[in-house]
Amino acid sequence: MKRFYSDDADQSEVTDETALNADTDDVFTEDEENSFPAPGNSAAFKGPLSSTPNLTKRTQQNYYFREGDTSKAKAPMDSVFSKGHLSPKSNSPAVQRKNIKIQPLSSVGSREGNSLLKGYERQWLFEAVSKGEASALDGLLEYLVKSNEQLTDWKFTDPETGKTALLKALLNLNKQRNDTIPVLLEIAEKTNNLNQFINTAYSDSYYKGQTALHIAIERRCLHFVALLLRNGADVHAKANGIFFMQKEGQTGFYFGELPLSLAACTNQLDVVTHLVENPYHPADIAATDSMGNNVLHALVSISDNTKENTKFVTQMYDHLLRMAVKIRLELNLENVKNKKGLTPIKLAAKTGKMQ
């Protein structure tokens, strides 16, 4: 079905002015070490094949979206280990990751019932999608239908974080593509599970509320943003876990919780425009987060008065003001007060973040 496939041309542009960006996919998760062979010309998905641009190295001050950037310091968001393995209190020896042989249903035989394929479980599924091997999912739909199961069932999700195969796949892109994503969406639709599958968010306290749409935006993948919106992604989902809270001296990144604010705070004009103007699920440009902050408040919050940062924040700020007036002439985002009674301008003056 065409609506599950991405457009070749839809790719977020990264410029020299980008202040908040992803250097390479392997910065964030242990599965993303660019060790996978480039996917072939899959008939199911034709995504952009351009190489990752040479971007400025980020630091914690420039808002890492994950905790670790080496194989020894990975955030629990996409670790194959439990959080206990990352705890300094743990005396357990290092756990070696095992290579799992992926075995499609077609190779198993004709056994019936739930014993049709014992390999169809979370560990197998996550391994398949992390490698982007769409062919490994052959037979999964048949299995789910016969066993009356869905991709959001407990056996296919991480019990500690609530992570689904879709979240796992988006966290493991190779040159901004993963051929399993459109296959997963089509399987979810055919098992009457598409809306729930797309919008299932992290449930752990650290990354609570983060959805597939948030991750697609963070990965700067306009084509996946468009694909998710076309298939029912909640454009107003709020990522409000501990990592996304506004607290000084704490590792994390506050961006205003909403997908639109995330796109704005990571300098993605094309994604911002698509979120607001797409015909499927347009974002409310005036939406606010749990602190009453709108997208302009969020921009003020992440500004740091450096030359590069100030340039992109100012450009994005003005772009959003123009978009708001275009939507509704009387809509003035600068007049909105947050729960502390501060407008974006007053917040900037109070914090001294904008010159």
Image (tube, grey):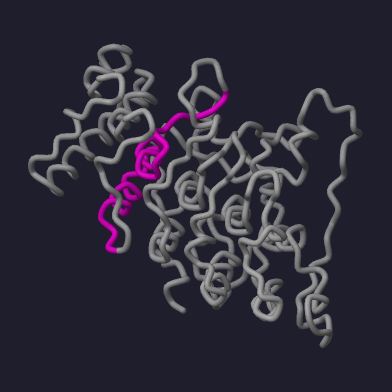
Q: Residue most toward the bottom?
A: 110
Picture residue at 64% right of the left edge, 77% below the top: 141
The x, y position of residue 264, in whole percent, is 35, 39
The x, y position of residue 316, in whole percent, is 28, 36
Picture residue at 50% right of the left edge, 16% below the top: 248
Q: Residue most toward the left?
A: 329
Frontmost residue, 195 versus 349? 195
Frontmost residue, 311 versus 178? 178
The x, y position of residue 84, in whole percent, is 78, 34
In the shown orientation, is residue 60 left or right of residue 326?
A: right
Q: Is residue 319 inside the magenta stretch? A: no
Picture residue at 55% right of the left edge, 60% below the top: 177
**Vertical order, 177 against 322 (above or below):** below
The quarter of the image holding the C terminus is: top left
Q: Is residue 264 inside the magenta stretch? A: yes
In the rendered image, which quarter is residue 108 located in? bottom right
The x, y position of residue 96, in whole percent, is 87, 44
**Vertical order, 193 against 30 (above or below):** below
Q: Which residues are magenta?
A: 251-279
In the shown orientation, is residue 318 left or right of residue 135?
A: left
**Vertical order, 253 against 212 (above or below):** above
Q: How many marks?
A: 0
Picture residue at 51% right of the left edge, 22% below the top: 61
